[in-house]
Amino acid sequence: MTEDLANIQLEQYGDFFIEMPGVHYVAVVKDDNNVANDYSMEIGVDKKFEKDVNLILKQRKSILEKIPFELKLPIKRKKSRFLRKDINSFKGINFVRSLPFYFQNEIASGQEISMTNASQAKGTIGAIVELENHKGDFILSNWHVMMQSSGDLGAGIDNKSDEKIAELFWGLNNEYYDIALSKIISKKQIIKERKIDTVKKYKDIRIGDSVKIEGFKSGFDKNTIYSKNAYVKVGNEERIFKNQIMTGKLSVSGDSGSIVLNKKNEIIGIVCAGDNKKFSICNHLHSLLSSNILPKYEYGDKGKKKIIKMPEIKFKAIYTNKSLIIRS
């Protein structure tokens, strides 16, 4: 089927399947690599749940008739790789350490960061960012790296040496994004070697395209895009993310927050999770980084009287290291 029809299929059936026990992702993938526009919806399932999922698939007509879909499409084709077996769960937060590969007096993309006093939760500086409507330089990474569950603005961000280098400034934590900014307060030299001018639009991203990162744990790594529209479960709480990019294994624990570029050094997304074996998961970034203004909003639990007021922001410039740019 065409990519558009496969995307409609995912929108209709994705929520139903991703909530099933043992299902780790539901994604639009290329069905036949030798055919230009041949796609299908694929389910990634844990091996021990394979029989349960297969049973539901056999019964799907009677089950899905009870769900009020506007469009009914055949889920499986003769050539479709509908069920992918023995998939590991995706993890978003890392519990590992690595040796530093940068000068201690510098702040640059690819370096290790963590929340102050969070000795085990590590991640990566994805990029150095400038904003149109706020002065200073900012670190771009994941919410789960820099904010975790609190979202407290002004909390500290440390480098590898446990020195406070930044403070939490803004974040977005929903079913599409795991992203945050912290404002650099350190007097260390900020490395902005290469400005990235292009953020790839969703429609222009292609399955099979080569992508690369520079994470604090992996260093430089590369792979290809497996899906650009996937529903995935992440973490022990099985949080569900939608409209995600899946790549072949591009990252390991500790690389969360790494910016993802293609061969032309255009931004594809930001790493937020992975299974450390087969796949990495990335947020799309075009809608955020290309927006005129991201309006201020409130985040939190009014019942618990903990409301965080996120500021209005507009992205101006994004910088990464020369070492990531020149490698392919």
Image (cartoon, rainbow, N blue to C red):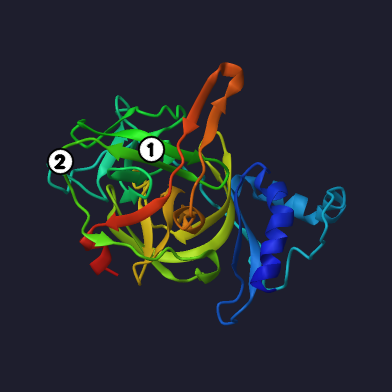
- Give how far across and how far down residue 276 sits, in percent: 41, 49
Query: In this figure, which residue is indicated by the disc labeled 1?
Result: 145
> At x 28% / y 45%, what residue is drawn?
137
Q: Nearer the viewer, mark 1 or mark 2?
A: 2
Kind of residue at disc 2: Lys
Query: In this figure, which residue is indicated by the disc labeled 2?
Result: 188
- Judged from the image, the secondary structure of the residue bearing numbered disc 1 is helix
Sequence order check, earlier mark of 1 and 2: 1
> At x 53% / y 64%, what residue is drawn?
202
Kind of residue at disc 1: Val
User: Is residue 155 at least partly visible in the picture?
Assistant: yes
**Going by the image, does 148 lie left or right of 13?**
left
Quarter of the image with the C terminus in it: bottom left
**Going by the image, does 6 lie left or right of 141?**
right
Q: Are marks 1 and 2 in contact (CB under 8 Å)?
A: no
User: Is residue 127 at least partly visible in the picture?
Assistant: no
Answer above or below: position of 160 versus 323.
Answer: above
